[in-house]
Image (spheres, rainbow, N blue to C red):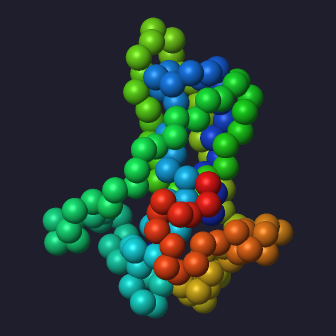
């Protein structure tokens, strides 16, 4: 099963203008890695909700995360398979952010038709062609993937 949403939308409600303010951390290009390495050949997620297990070997090295520097009102769009987390909070300021999980109105039909197995962008109409043009080759490593 695919994640039950198409996009993660984050809206900053407070400024996070330097690192260490509880910034949203992202690994640019990680959605390509996740899509390729967490699926069976038919495209279905190997272990929906089960995460990485010891039998999978060591966790992949995704490199250094980018702590996003945001002003209140900035919006972040993340593919549902992008690696992300909250960053360290090293100040007395509280970090406020609201998140929405958006999904395509025909998401359940796309899932039933196994459309996600062949196309990780099938639920993002209007941007599909532009995103496919930017996709790395099958032999690309995480370090060579677009940001």
Q: Please tell me which residue lies in front, 90 or 115.
A: 90
> Which quarter of the rendering shows the N terminus?
bottom left
Q: Residue 101: in sight, yes or no?
A: no
Residue 133 position, x and y percent, is: 74, 74
Residue 112 position, x and y percent, is: 57, 85
Residue 37, above or below 75:
below
Q: Residue 67: in sight, yes or no?
A: yes
> Which quarter of the rendering shows the C terminus?
bottom right
Q: Total label count?
A: 0
Q: Is residue 134 left or right of residue 39?
A: right
The residue at the point 51 percent across, 73 percent down is 140
Q: Residue furthest top?
A: 92
Q: Residue furthest front?
A: 144
Residue 110, above or below 101:
below
Q: Residue furthest left?
A: 54
Q: Is residue 111 left or right of residue 11?
A: left
The residue at the point 50 percent across, 50 percent down is 27
The residue at the point 17 percent across, 72 percent down is 55
Q: Please tell me which residue lies in front, 75 or 65.
A: 65
The residue at the point 67 percent across, 43 percent down is 76
Residue 58 position, x and y percent, is: 22, 62
Residue 16 position, x and y percent, is: 59, 23
Residue 111, above or below 8:
below
Q: Residue furthest right?
A: 126
């Amino acid at each position: 099963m695919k994640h039950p949403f198409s996009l993660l939308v984050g809206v900053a409600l407070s400024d996070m203008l330097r690192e260490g303010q509880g910034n949203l951390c992202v690994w640019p290009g990680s959605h390509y890695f996740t899509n390729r390495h967490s699926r069976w050949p038919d495209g279905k997620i190997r272990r929906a909700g089960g995460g990485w297990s010891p039998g999978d070997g060591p966790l992949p090295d995704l490199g250094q995360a980018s702590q996003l520097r945001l002003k209140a009102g900035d919006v972040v769009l993340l593919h549902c398979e992008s690696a992300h987390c909250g960053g360290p909070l090293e100040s007395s300021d509280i970090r406020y952010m609201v998140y929405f999980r958006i999904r395509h109105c025909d998401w359940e039909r796309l899932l039933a038709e196994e459309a996600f197995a062949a196309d990780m962008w099938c639920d993002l109409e209007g941007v599909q062609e532009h995103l496919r043009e930017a996709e790395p080759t099958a032999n690309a490593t995480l370090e060579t993937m677009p940001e």
